[in-house]
Amino acid sequence: MADNERVPTVIADDAHIIYKIVGAIGTNQNSPLSAFKRVLTRTNSANIREVHAVKGVSFVAYRGEAIGLIGSNGSGKSTLLRAVAGLLPVAKGAIFAAGQPSLLGVNAALMADLSGERNVELGCLAMGMSPSEVKARTKEIIDFSGINERGDFASLPMRTYSSGMGARLRFSIAAAKQHDVLLIDEALATGDAKFRRRSEARVRELRAQAGTVFLVSHSEQTIRDTCERAIWLESGSIRADGPTEDVLKEYETFSKK
Ligand SMILES: Nc1ncnc2c1ncn2[C@@H]1O[C@H](COP(=O)(O)OP(=O)(O)OP(=O)(O)O)[C@@H](O)[C@H]1O
């Protein structure tokens, strides 16, 4: 496809994301008197520390692409995804997205005391499906998740599920809908091999239906199998952005050092 025919879905323009952490450093810093003094003098608490997690990231993602985000622990991958989903503010620069990007596991926030089936229904309603659509899709979503493979777990409260089962159900709910931009944070890695194959196939389907998929994973194999483009983040900055094999090669060389 020629570059001018490609439709951008996410644009990051020199995006910076900064966490502000309020923590106790000295005990007198937390006293009501010192808080009152800060209000009067309009000074910030010395207890506020900043973590500059993403430092000037720029990229354009297009419809139909699956992009793998790779990088060392703490390099800013999850932070960047959450900012694309609109869950974290951008301190400087901007992130533009088509439609409402869905971050897997957050948009389908599940309730521990409700059954898996009820959670599927609520999750689908929350994603904007009509009640009749929800009714028609519930069984298919539960079957996809595989939580009923060892008995009727769909009717039990979610708190009785293993963490892998919960993650599979979350993925299945989120993947039931066609998203303009779907953001997946390590979710595929939580399932067993059979579920991973199924979910990778579903990611490919979502891409074929013209959405954009972002996938954060430490598994190079998952990135290879699912994404044709990869972005390598290190200490909050992009070190490489391009075809998956090229970026993985650079990342592997860096990791071996
Ligand atoms: N809620 C938070 N409050 C403050 N700092 C945070 C918070 N979440 C992450 N950070 C910091 O932001 C930086 C980037 O973290 P992030 O979780 O985005 O990295 P990551 O690349 O996803 O890491 P991992 O591969 O370990 O999941 C780290 O320095 C981390 O300590």
Image (tube, rainbow, N blue to C red):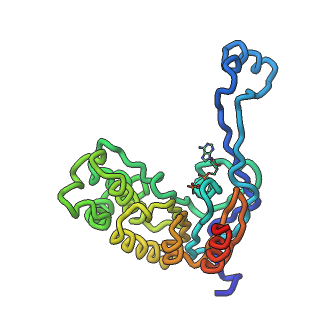
In the figure, 211 relative to 112: above or below?
below
Residue located 52% across and 64% down the image = 182
> Residue furthest toward the right?
41
> Residue furthest toward the bottom?
1
Query: Residue 2: horizontal and vertical position, in percent?
Result: 68, 86
Q: Nearer the viewer, residue 125 or 78?
A: 78
Residue located 68% across and 67% down the image = 257
Residue 47 in view in this figure:
yes
Q: Nearer the viewer, residue 238 or 218?
A: 218
Q: Is residue 184 left or right of residue 141?
A: right
Query: Residue 44: horizontal and vertical position, in percent?
Result: 76, 28
In the figure, 176 relative to 158: above or below?
below
Residue 85 in view in this figure:
no
Residue 100: image quadrant is: bottom right
Residue located 56% across and 66% down the image = 214
Residue 150: image quadrant is: bottom left
> Residue furthest toward the top?
33
Q: Nearer the viewer, residue 237 or 41?
A: 237
Residue 246: image quadrant is: bottom right
Q: Is residue 120 left or right of residue 243?
A: left
Q: Nearer the viewer, residue 76 or 86?
A: 76
Query: Residue 200: horizontal and vertical position, in percent?
Result: 43, 73
